[in-house]
Image (tube, rainbow, N blue to C red):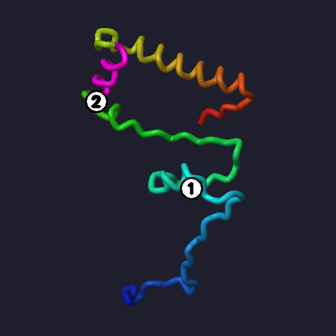
Amino acid sequence: MILPPPGTKTNSKPQRRRRPKPTLFGPDPFSQHYASRLDGVYDCVDRLTINAYFPVAQTPGGFRTWWRDLYGSDDNLDNTHLMRLAGRFGRRVRGWAQKHGVPVISC
């Protein structure tokens, strides 16, 4: 047992572990497969939260490789084309969501 240094105030109440929030449904196969990479539990079937990490794009060389695979060369790799690509992606996500009645919340 490790004791605190003398003169240190201690909590009279021991810290309890929080139990995971009970969910409406049991764990689905997707959640079980990616359990080590998921943070938290979702039990609402009409919500999807995406937080993606794309390791290739985390380095300049990796990003250039991805761009060349996408466009064939990096001749058009500039701010204009990056902004255009981001705008198209955003419009497509919002268009799909509007068509299917899915609200989009930007955060």
Secondary element type, mark 1: loop
Q: Amino acid at mark 2?
A: Gly
Q: Quadrant of the N terminus?
A: bottom left
Q: Which mark is residue 40?
A: 1
Q: Is residue 12 above or below residue 104?
A: below
Q: Is residue 33 above or below residue 48?
A: below
Comparing 96 with 28, the one in front is: 28
Q: Is residue 58 above or below residue 72?
A: below
Q: Amino acid at mark 1?
A: Gly
The image shows residue 25 at horizontal and vertical percentages of: 69, 57
Circle 2 Cα neighbour tier, 10 Å, few/some/many (<14 / 14–19 / ≥20): few
Left or right of 58? Residue 29 is right
Q: Residue at x 52, y 54 (%)?
A: 39
Q: Which mark is residue 82?
A: none
Q: Which mark is residue 62?
A: 2
Sequence-first disc among 1 and 2: 1
Identify the magenta region.
63-71
Q: Residue at x 71, y 58 (%)?
A: 24
